[in-house]
Amino acid sequence: TWDAPYNYRKIMCDEEDPEPPQDVDPISFAVDKSTDPDKIFGVSCAVVGQVVVMDQAIGELLGTIRELKQENETLVGLIGVSGYPLGEHGMVGGESGALYAETLHCPCMFRFGEEMPVGLRLPTIMQPHEIGDWVVTWLNMELADHEDSATLDQLCDESIDTPNRIGAAIAIAENECFIASPAWSCRIQSQ
């Protein structure tokens, strides 16, 4: 349910912009040349409203952890289940669709105590099952270095690549696949 207060949807709107939609069910529709761009903009505003609510909830969680003085002992991880298409490839929303980057890229945020500065972005490509390995790497460094906690440099240098994994990801659907590496991505569709 899209339950963000309606005024959060209007954060991105100027006076001359149309009103964002008021639907509480996630919005989904096909896009073609006749689709009004204002309709897509409205959905984008609704998405922004939901993101603002999530940001506030995450802030409250982190504030509580700080108040309990547990920030150095607590690993916080937030992982999305999918991206949300906003019309780039003929679809807004939807539970399933073609394999494109905007639906396959998932938000994944970790707070490793006070080790990582806010806003650090690592360019690592991972499949969902590999995130656990990355977290275990960090935890093992913590356990090995009782006095000296893992540094940011150690974590970034610690590679999870193996002879069978080269920093790429693949997604496969019924008649298509998507492959991504740090340098390129490719969507292959069979007839």
Image (tube, helix red, strand yellow):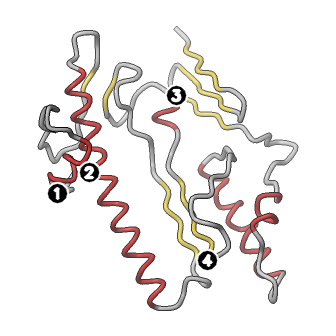
N-terminal label among 2 and 4: 2
Q: Tell me the quarter of the picture where residue 71 sits.
A: bottom right
Q: Residue 39, percent across and down?
A: 20, 27
* Residue tagged 1: 5
| SS under mark 1 | loop
Q: Compare residues 12 and 49 and report the one nearer the observer.
A: 12
State if disc 2 and disc 1 touch (CB < 8 Å).
yes
Instruction: Answer left or right for 136 relative to 178.
Output: right
Task: Using the image, determine if residue 143 lies above or below residue 189.
Answer: below
Whole-number angstrom distance, CA of label 1 to CA of label 4: 31 Å
Whole-number angstrom distance, CA of label 1 to CA of label 2: 7 Å
N-terminal label among 2 and 3: 2
State if disc 1 and disc 3 touch (CB < 8 Å).
no
What amino acid type should be assigned to the residue bearing mark 2? Gly
Query: Mark 2: few, some, or many residues within 10 Å (few <14, many ≥20)?
Result: many
N-terminal label among 3 and 4: 4
Query: Mark 3: few, some, or many residues within 10 Å (few <14, many ≥20)?
Result: few
State if disc 4 and disc 3 touch (CB < 8 Å).
no
What amino acid type should be assigned to the residue bearing mark 4? Gly
Residue at screen point 75% across, 66% down: 152
* Residue tagged 3: 173
Q: Tell me the quarter of the picture where residue 86 sits.
A: top left
Whole-number angstrom distance, CA of label 3 to CA of label 4: 37 Å
Residue at screen point 63% across, 22% down: 186
